[in-house]
Amino acid sequence: MREMSFDCVVIGGGAAGMAAALELEARDLSVAIAEREERLGGILTQCIHNGFGLIEFNEELTGPEFAERFEERIGGRRISVFCGCTVLDMVADEGEQVLSCVSAKEGALRLRSRAVILAMGCRERNRGNVRIPGSRPAGVFTAGLAQRLVNVEGYVPGREVVIIGSGDIGLIMARRMSWIGCKVHAVVEILPYPSGLTRNIVQCLHDFDIPLYLSHLTTGIYGRDRVEGIEVAPIENAALMMGKAFKIPCDTVLLSVGLVPENELSREAGVSINPMTNGAWTDSTLMTSLPGIFACGNVLHVHDLVDYVVEEARRAGRCAAAWLEGARPCREARVKAGSNVRYVVPARVDTGRDNKLYLRTMIVKNDAILEVRIDGKVLLSSRKNHVQPSEMLTLTLGKAQLAAAAELPDAAVEISIQ
Protein backbone atom coordinates (compact mmCIF):
# COMPACT_ATOMS: atom_id res chain seq x y z
CA MET A 1 0.00 0.00 0.00
CA ARG A 2 1.34 3.38 -1.01
CA GLU A 3 1.89 5.71 1.96
CA MET A 4 2.38 9.48 1.89
CA SER A 5 2.86 12.04 4.67
CA PHE A 6 1.64 15.66 4.91
CA ASP A 7 1.34 18.33 7.54
CA CYS A 8 -2.42 18.34 6.98
CA VAL A 9 -4.97 16.40 4.95
CA VAL A 10 -8.27 18.04 3.99
CA ILE A 11 -11.13 15.59 3.47
CA GLY A 12 -13.46 17.03 0.84
CA GLY A 13 -12.69 19.15 -2.20
CA GLY A 14 -15.69 21.48 -2.30
CA ALA A 15 -15.60 25.17 -1.50
CA ALA A 16 -14.69 24.52 2.16
CA GLY A 17 -11.94 22.03 1.41
CA MET A 18 -10.29 24.18 -1.25
CA ALA A 19 -10.42 27.34 0.85
CA ALA A 20 -8.92 25.58 3.88
CA ALA A 21 -6.17 23.96 1.80
CA LEU A 22 -5.17 27.30 0.27
CA GLU A 23 -4.76 28.83 3.75
CA LEU A 24 -2.51 25.98 4.85
CA GLU A 25 -0.36 26.07 1.71
CA ALA A 26 0.05 29.84 2.05
CA ARG A 27 1.80 29.15 5.36
CA ASP A 28 4.33 26.79 3.73
CA LEU A 29 2.70 23.64 5.08
CA SER A 30 2.38 20.49 3.01
CA VAL A 31 -1.28 19.74 2.35
CA ALA A 32 -3.37 17.22 0.45
CA ILE A 33 -7.04 17.17 -0.55
CA ALA A 34 -8.89 13.85 -0.67
CA GLU A 35 -12.06 14.18 -2.78
CA ARG A 36 -14.34 11.23 -3.59
CA GLU A 37 -15.73 12.77 -6.80
CA GLU A 38 -13.75 12.83 -10.03
CA ARG A 39 -13.18 16.57 -9.84
CA LEU A 40 -13.03 19.35 -7.30
CA GLY A 41 -15.98 21.64 -6.60
CA GLY A 42 -18.38 19.50 -4.60
CA ILE A 43 -22.07 20.32 -4.92
CA LEU A 44 -21.23 23.60 -6.69
CA THR A 45 -20.61 21.76 -9.97
CA GLN A 46 -24.34 21.00 -10.36
CA CYS A 47 -25.65 24.37 -9.15
CA ILE A 48 -25.82 26.18 -12.49
CA HIS A 49 -28.03 28.98 -11.15
CA ASN A 50 -26.49 32.32 -10.19
CA GLY A 51 -26.36 33.97 -6.77
CA PHE A 52 -22.94 32.74 -5.64
CA GLY A 53 -19.95 34.93 -4.84
CA LEU A 54 -21.65 38.20 -3.93
CA ILE A 55 -19.58 38.43 -0.75
CA GLU A 56 -16.46 36.50 -1.77
CA PHE A 57 -15.95 38.00 -5.24
CA ASN A 58 -18.31 41.00 -5.14
CA GLU A 59 -20.07 39.69 -8.24
CA GLU A 60 -22.80 37.21 -9.07
CA LEU A 61 -21.56 33.81 -10.28
CA THR A 62 -22.99 30.39 -10.98
CA GLY A 63 -21.89 27.46 -8.81
CA PRO A 64 -19.45 26.04 -11.42
CA GLU A 65 -17.97 29.51 -11.95
CA PHE A 66 -17.46 29.92 -8.19
CA ALA A 67 -15.79 26.51 -7.96
CA GLU A 68 -13.61 27.21 -11.00
CA ARG A 69 -12.19 30.35 -9.38
CA PHE A 70 -10.90 28.22 -6.49
CA GLU A 71 -9.76 25.35 -8.74
CA GLU A 72 -7.58 27.80 -10.64
CA ARG A 73 -5.95 28.89 -7.38
CA ILE A 74 -5.41 25.26 -6.33
CA GLY A 75 -3.77 24.48 -9.67
CA GLY A 76 -1.09 27.07 -9.10
CA ARG A 77 -0.16 25.92 -5.59
CA ARG A 78 1.81 23.04 -4.07
CA ILE A 79 -1.28 21.15 -3.02
CA SER A 80 -1.59 17.41 -3.68
CA VAL A 81 -5.06 16.61 -4.97
CA PHE A 82 -6.48 13.08 -4.92
CA CYS A 83 -9.78 13.04 -6.81
CA GLY A 84 -11.88 9.88 -7.04
CA CYS A 85 -10.41 9.06 -3.63
CA THR A 86 -12.67 7.81 -0.81
CA VAL A 87 -11.48 7.94 2.80
CA LEU A 88 -12.57 4.71 4.51
CA ASP A 89 -11.38 5.41 8.03
CA MET A 90 -9.25 7.71 10.16
CA VAL A 91 -7.15 6.34 13.02
CA ALA A 92 -4.74 8.04 15.44
CA ASP A 93 -1.21 6.64 15.46
CA GLU A 94 1.66 8.07 17.52
CA GLY A 95 0.52 11.69 17.33
CA GLU A 96 -0.58 11.49 13.71
CA GLN A 97 -3.79 10.67 11.88
CA VAL A 98 -3.71 7.79 9.41
CA LEU A 99 -6.32 7.91 6.65
CA SER A 100 -6.98 4.70 4.73
CA CYS A 101 -8.24 5.53 1.23
CA VAL A 102 -9.18 3.76 -1.99
CA SER A 103 -8.90 5.27 -5.44
CA ALA A 104 -9.44 3.92 -8.95
CA LYS A 105 -6.27 5.73 -10.01
CA GLU A 106 -4.06 5.23 -6.95
CA GLY A 107 -5.48 1.96 -5.63
CA ALA A 108 -5.18 1.47 -1.88
CA LEU A 109 -3.60 4.54 -0.33
CA ARG A 110 -2.58 5.57 3.18
CA LEU A 111 -2.25 9.26 4.00
CA ARG A 112 -0.52 10.28 7.22
CA SER A 113 -0.77 13.79 8.65
CA ARG A 114 -0.29 15.75 11.84
CA ALA A 115 -3.66 17.49 11.35
CA VAL A 116 -6.91 16.84 9.48
CA ILE A 117 -9.61 19.25 8.35
CA LEU A 118 -13.06 17.73 7.87
CA ALA A 119 -14.82 19.40 4.94
CA MET A 120 -17.10 16.63 3.62
CA GLY A 121 -20.18 18.81 3.26
CA CYS A 122 -23.70 17.55 3.82
CA ARG A 123 -26.27 15.19 2.35
CA GLU A 124 -30.01 15.36 1.82
CA ARG A 125 -32.61 13.86 4.09
CA ASN A 126 -34.78 11.40 2.19
CA ARG A 127 -38.26 9.89 2.36
CA GLY A 128 -37.19 7.43 5.03
CA ASN A 129 -36.09 10.31 7.27
CA VAL A 130 -39.50 12.01 7.16
CA ARG A 131 -41.57 8.80 7.02
CA ILE A 132 -44.17 9.76 4.45
CA PRO A 133 -46.67 6.87 4.21
CA GLY A 134 -48.07 5.37 1.04
CA SER A 135 -46.87 3.11 -1.75
CA ARG A 136 -43.31 3.00 -3.10
CA PRO A 137 -43.57 3.92 -6.79
CA ALA A 138 -40.88 5.27 -9.10
CA GLY A 139 -40.67 9.02 -9.49
CA VAL A 140 -39.63 10.03 -5.96
CA PHE A 141 -36.31 11.88 -5.89
CA THR A 142 -34.42 14.14 -3.52
CA ALA A 143 -34.21 17.64 -4.96
CA GLY A 144 -30.41 17.47 -5.16
CA LEU A 145 -30.51 14.22 -7.13
CA ALA A 146 -33.02 15.75 -9.54
CA GLN A 147 -30.73 18.76 -9.88
CA ARG A 148 -27.84 16.51 -10.85
CA LEU A 149 -29.97 14.55 -13.31
CA VAL A 150 -31.13 17.72 -15.06
CA ASN A 151 -28.03 19.90 -14.89
CA VAL A 152 -25.24 17.34 -15.22
CA GLU A 153 -26.66 14.14 -16.72
CA GLY A 154 -29.18 15.78 -19.04
CA TYR A 155 -32.22 13.77 -17.94
CA VAL A 156 -35.73 15.03 -17.21
CA PRO A 157 -36.99 13.08 -14.15
CA GLY A 158 -40.67 13.84 -14.75
CA ARG A 159 -43.22 16.28 -16.18
CA GLU A 160 -45.88 16.85 -13.51
CA VAL A 161 -44.04 17.82 -10.34
CA VAL A 162 -44.81 18.42 -6.67
CA ILE A 163 -42.08 19.47 -4.25
CA ILE A 164 -42.30 18.46 -0.59
CA GLY A 165 -40.43 20.88 1.65
CA SER A 166 -39.40 24.46 0.94
CA GLY A 167 -35.63 24.18 1.36
CA ASP A 168 -33.48 26.21 -1.00
CA ILE A 169 -32.61 23.30 -3.30
CA GLY A 170 -36.30 22.48 -3.69
CA LEU A 171 -37.18 26.10 -4.45
CA ILE A 172 -34.42 26.36 -7.02
CA MET A 173 -35.57 23.11 -8.62
CA ALA A 174 -39.13 24.44 -8.82
CA ARG A 175 -37.78 27.17 -11.08
CA ARG A 176 -35.46 24.82 -12.96
CA MET A 177 -38.21 22.30 -13.71
CA SER A 178 -40.43 25.13 -14.92
CA TRP A 179 -37.68 26.34 -17.24
CA ILE A 180 -37.37 22.93 -18.94
CA GLY A 181 -41.10 22.77 -19.63
CA CYS A 182 -42.41 20.83 -16.64
CA LYS A 183 -45.45 21.81 -14.60
CA VAL A 184 -44.75 22.36 -10.91
CA HIS A 185 -48.13 22.07 -9.21
CA ALA A 186 -47.13 23.02 -5.67
CA VAL A 187 -44.53 23.27 -2.94
CA VAL A 188 -45.81 21.75 0.32
CA GLU A 189 -44.26 22.84 3.65
CA ILE A 190 -45.17 21.45 7.08
CA LEU A 191 -43.95 24.57 8.89
CA PRO A 192 -45.89 27.85 9.04
CA TYR A 193 -42.98 29.64 7.33
CA PRO A 194 -40.69 28.78 4.39
CA SER A 195 -37.46 26.87 5.02
CA GLY A 196 -35.56 28.60 2.22
CA LEU A 197 -34.20 32.08 1.68
CA THR A 198 -36.67 34.87 0.99
CA ARG A 199 -35.02 35.69 -2.34
CA ASN A 200 -35.62 32.11 -3.51
CA ILE A 201 -39.28 32.27 -2.50
CA VAL A 202 -39.67 35.36 -4.67
CA GLN A 203 -37.52 34.36 -7.64
CA CYS A 204 -38.43 30.67 -7.80
CA LEU A 205 -42.08 30.54 -6.70
CA HIS A 206 -43.74 33.96 -6.97
CA ASP A 207 -42.18 34.72 -10.37
CA PHE A 208 -43.57 31.43 -11.73
CA ASP A 209 -46.96 31.48 -9.97
CA ILE A 210 -46.16 28.24 -8.12
CA PRO A 211 -48.43 27.73 -5.06
CA LEU A 212 -46.77 27.38 -1.64
CA TYR A 213 -48.84 25.49 0.92
CA LEU A 214 -47.53 26.42 4.39
CA SER A 215 -48.66 24.46 7.48
CA HIS A 216 -49.54 21.47 5.30
CA LEU A 217 -48.46 17.87 5.85
CA THR A 218 -47.98 15.34 3.07
CA THR A 219 -49.99 12.38 4.34
CA GLY A 220 -49.40 9.97 1.48
CA ILE A 221 -47.69 9.25 -1.84
CA TYR A 222 -49.72 7.17 -4.27
CA GLY A 223 -49.10 5.16 -7.42
CA ARG A 224 -48.29 1.62 -8.43
CA ASP A 225 -45.39 1.66 -10.89
CA ARG A 226 -45.06 5.43 -11.12
CA VAL A 227 -46.18 8.24 -8.80
CA GLU A 228 -49.76 9.25 -9.52
CA GLY A 229 -50.25 11.87 -6.82
CA ILE A 230 -49.88 12.92 -3.21
CA GLU A 231 -52.37 13.63 -0.44
CA VAL A 232 -51.99 16.81 1.60
CA ALA A 233 -53.77 17.93 4.77
CA PRO A 234 -53.63 21.34 6.48
CA ILE A 235 -52.46 21.88 10.05
CA GLU A 236 -54.60 24.28 12.07
CA ASN A 237 -53.89 25.17 15.69
CA ALA A 238 -51.35 22.33 15.85
CA ALA A 239 -53.98 19.78 14.76
CA LEU A 240 -53.92 17.81 11.50
CA MET A 241 -57.21 18.42 9.69
CA MET A 242 -57.73 15.20 7.74
CA GLY A 243 -61.27 16.29 6.94
CA LYS A 244 -59.76 19.01 4.73
CA ALA A 245 -57.23 16.74 3.01
CA PHE A 246 -56.91 16.98 -0.77
CA LYS A 247 -54.94 15.27 -3.53
CA ILE A 248 -52.54 16.78 -6.04
CA PRO A 249 -52.01 14.68 -9.20
CA CYS A 250 -48.38 14.36 -10.30
CA ASP A 251 -45.88 11.90 -11.78
CA THR A 252 -42.83 13.18 -9.88
CA VAL A 253 -42.15 14.10 -6.26
CA LEU A 254 -39.04 16.01 -5.24
CA LEU A 255 -38.06 16.00 -1.56
CA SER A 256 -36.47 19.13 -0.12
CA VAL A 257 -36.78 18.25 3.56
CA GLY A 258 -33.44 19.35 4.96
CA LEU A 259 -29.72 18.69 4.89
CA VAL A 260 -27.57 16.72 7.32
CA PRO A 261 -23.79 17.12 7.82
CA GLU A 262 -21.91 14.13 6.35
CA ASN A 263 -20.36 12.90 9.59
CA GLU A 264 -20.24 9.10 9.39
CA LEU A 265 -16.44 9.17 9.12
CA SER A 266 -16.24 11.65 12.01
CA ARG A 267 -18.37 9.46 14.28
CA GLU A 268 -16.35 6.34 13.52
CA ALA A 269 -13.16 8.23 14.37
CA GLY A 270 -14.61 9.21 17.76
CA VAL A 271 -15.44 12.89 17.11
CA SER A 272 -18.13 14.19 19.50
CA ILE A 273 -21.26 15.30 17.64
CA ASN A 274 -23.58 18.18 18.53
CA PRO A 275 -27.15 16.79 18.36
CA MET A 276 -28.57 20.19 17.40
CA THR A 277 -26.42 20.59 14.28
CA ASN A 278 -25.40 16.96 13.62
CA GLY A 279 -21.93 18.42 13.18
CA ALA A 280 -18.91 18.23 15.46
CA TRP A 281 -18.55 20.08 18.73
CA THR A 282 -15.69 22.54 18.19
CA ASP A 283 -13.70 24.93 20.31
CA SER A 284 -12.84 28.53 19.42
CA THR A 285 -10.33 27.33 16.79
CA LEU A 286 -12.84 25.00 15.09
CA MET A 287 -10.96 22.00 16.49
CA THR A 288 -13.16 19.02 17.34
CA SER A 289 -13.01 16.89 20.47
CA LEU A 290 -10.03 15.03 18.94
CA PRO A 291 -6.75 17.00 19.01
CA GLY A 292 -5.56 18.02 15.57
CA ILE A 293 -8.88 17.35 13.81
CA PHE A 294 -10.76 20.48 12.66
CA ALA A 295 -14.14 20.91 10.96
CA CYS A 296 -15.64 23.61 8.76
CA GLY A 297 -18.37 24.29 6.25
CA ASN A 298 -21.49 22.19 5.89
CA VAL A 299 -19.97 19.21 7.70
CA LEU A 300 -19.89 21.42 10.82
CA HIS A 301 -23.31 23.05 10.38
CA VAL A 302 -25.45 23.65 7.31
CA HIS A 303 -24.87 27.12 5.86
CA ASP A 304 -27.19 29.08 3.60
CA LEU A 305 -24.44 30.86 1.61
CA VAL A 306 -21.27 29.36 0.16
CA ASP A 307 -19.52 32.66 0.90
CA TYR A 308 -19.90 31.91 4.63
CA VAL A 309 -18.60 28.39 4.01
CA VAL A 310 -15.42 29.82 2.50
CA GLU A 311 -15.03 32.34 5.31
CA GLU A 312 -15.31 29.63 7.96
CA ALA A 313 -12.98 27.28 6.05
CA ARG A 314 -10.28 29.91 5.82
CA ARG A 315 -10.52 30.30 9.56
CA ALA A 316 -10.18 26.53 10.00
CA GLY A 317 -7.13 26.53 7.76
CA ARG A 318 -5.49 29.36 9.72
CA CYS A 319 -6.29 27.72 13.05
CA ALA A 320 -4.98 24.33 11.91
CA ALA A 321 -1.77 25.98 10.75
CA ALA A 322 -1.40 27.80 14.07
CA TRP A 323 -2.04 24.56 15.98
CA LEU A 324 0.66 22.80 13.97
CA GLU A 325 3.01 25.62 14.94
CA GLY A 326 2.20 25.17 18.63
CA ALA A 327 -0.34 27.96 19.20
CA ARG A 328 -3.21 27.35 21.62
CA PRO A 329 -6.19 29.50 22.77
CA CYS A 330 -5.44 31.92 25.63
CA ARG A 331 -8.55 31.27 27.68
CA GLU A 332 -11.82 29.90 26.41
CA ALA A 333 -15.39 30.49 27.56
CA ARG A 334 -18.39 28.31 26.79
CA VAL A 335 -21.03 29.56 24.37
CA LYS A 336 -24.63 28.75 25.20
CA ALA A 337 -27.73 28.96 23.00
CA GLY A 338 -30.32 30.96 24.94
CA SER A 339 -34.01 31.57 24.33
CA ASN A 340 -35.18 31.33 20.70
CA VAL A 341 -31.71 30.32 19.48
CA ARG A 342 -31.38 26.83 18.00
CA TYR A 343 -27.59 26.64 18.01
CA VAL A 344 -24.40 28.68 18.07
CA VAL A 345 -21.15 27.64 16.37
CA PRO A 346 -18.44 27.34 17.57
CA ALA A 347 -19.22 26.15 21.09
CA ARG A 348 -16.42 28.14 22.69
CA VAL A 349 -14.81 31.58 22.30
CA ASP A 350 -11.23 32.66 22.93
CA THR A 351 -11.37 35.61 25.30
CA GLY A 352 -7.98 36.81 24.06
CA ARG A 353 -9.05 37.66 20.50
CA ASP A 354 -12.00 38.44 18.19
CA ASN A 355 -14.44 35.60 17.61
CA LYS A 356 -17.00 35.23 14.82
CA LEU A 357 -20.07 33.19 15.73
CA TYR A 358 -22.77 31.69 13.53
CA LEU A 359 -26.27 31.07 14.86
CA ARG A 360 -29.81 30.23 13.82
CA THR A 361 -32.98 31.48 15.41
CA MET A 362 -36.02 29.33 16.15
CA ILE A 363 -38.58 32.06 15.45
CA VAL A 364 -39.77 34.35 12.68
CA LYS A 365 -39.89 37.93 13.95
CA ASN A 366 -39.56 41.55 12.86
CA ASP A 367 -37.65 44.03 15.04
CA ALA A 368 -36.00 41.27 17.05
CA ILE A 369 -33.42 41.94 19.75
CA LEU A 370 -30.25 39.84 19.85
CA GLU A 371 -28.69 39.80 23.32
CA VAL A 372 -25.36 38.51 24.58
CA ARG A 373 -25.07 37.88 28.31
CA ILE A 374 -22.21 36.82 30.55
CA ASP A 375 -23.08 35.72 34.08
CA GLY A 376 -26.54 37.27 33.67
CA LYS A 377 -25.18 40.68 32.65
CA VAL A 378 -26.10 42.06 29.21
CA LEU A 379 -22.86 42.40 27.28
CA LEU A 380 -24.32 43.34 23.90
CA SER A 381 -27.76 44.15 22.55
CA SER A 382 -28.54 44.75 18.87
CA ARG A 383 -31.72 45.11 16.86
CA LYS A 384 -32.42 42.91 13.84
CA ASN A 385 -34.98 44.08 11.30
CA HIS A 386 -36.06 40.51 10.60
CA VAL A 387 -34.99 37.04 11.71
CA GLN A 388 -36.11 33.62 10.52
CA PRO A 389 -34.72 30.08 10.88
CA SER A 390 -33.73 29.76 7.21
CA GLU A 391 -31.30 32.68 7.35
CA MET A 392 -28.16 32.31 9.42
CA LEU A 393 -27.07 35.15 11.67
CA THR A 394 -23.48 36.14 12.39
CA LEU A 395 -22.00 37.90 15.38
CA THR A 396 -18.47 39.03 16.23
CA LEU A 397 -17.35 39.31 19.85
CA GLY A 398 -14.09 41.12 20.49
CA LYS A 399 -11.44 40.80 23.18
CA ALA A 400 -12.69 43.89 25.02
CA GLN A 401 -16.27 42.61 25.08
CA LEU A 402 -15.14 39.25 26.46
CA ALA A 403 -13.02 40.74 29.25
CA ALA A 404 -15.66 39.84 31.84
CA ALA A 405 -15.64 36.22 30.71
CA ALA A 406 -11.86 36.10 30.99
CA GLU A 407 -12.08 37.03 34.68
CA LEU A 408 -14.78 34.51 35.64
CA PRO A 409 -14.06 30.81 36.14
CA ASP A 410 -16.19 28.58 33.91
CA ALA A 411 -17.93 31.63 32.40
CA ALA A 412 -20.65 31.05 29.80
CA VAL A 413 -21.56 33.43 27.00
CA GLU A 414 -25.30 33.15 26.42
CA ILE A 415 -26.89 34.37 23.19
CA SER A 416 -30.64 34.85 22.94
CA ILE A 417 -33.21 36.50 20.66
CA GLN A 418 -36.24 38.35 21.97
Image (cartoon, rainbow, N blue to C red):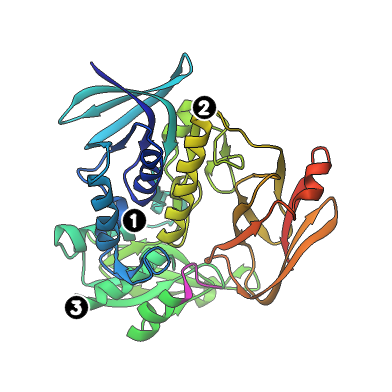
> Quarter-wise, where is residue 29 in the image?
top left
What kind of residue is marked 1? Ser
Residue at the disc numbered 3: 181
Quarter that holds the N terminus: top left
Between circles 2 and 3, the one closer to the viewer is 2
What kind of residue is marked 2? Gly
Q: Looking at the picture, tell me which residue is in the foreground, 183 or 172.
A: 172
Residue 197 forms part of the magenta stretch: yes
Mark 3 and mark 1 in contact (Cβ < 8 Å)? no
Quarter that holds the C terminus: bottom right
* Residue 324 shows up from this direction: yes
Q: CA distance from mark 1 to mark 2?
A: 38 Å
Mark sitting on residue 135 = 1
Q: Looking at the picture, tell me which residue is in the foreground, 176 or 366.
A: 366
Residue at the disc numbered 2: 270
Q: Looking at the picture, tell me which residue is in the foreground, 73 or 237.
A: 73
Q: Is residue 329 left or right of residue 136?
A: right
Residue 347 forms part of the magenta stretch: no
Whether 199 is drawn above or below 70: the answer is below
Location of residue 241 in the rendering, given as x and y in whole percent from the top left corner: 56, 72
- Report the residue at 33% width, 63% height from top: 254
Whether 395 is drawn above or below 209: the answer is above
> If you read the primary sequence from the N terminus, does the residue marked by circle 2 or circle 3 appear first?
3
- Report the residue at 42% width, 56% height from top: 133
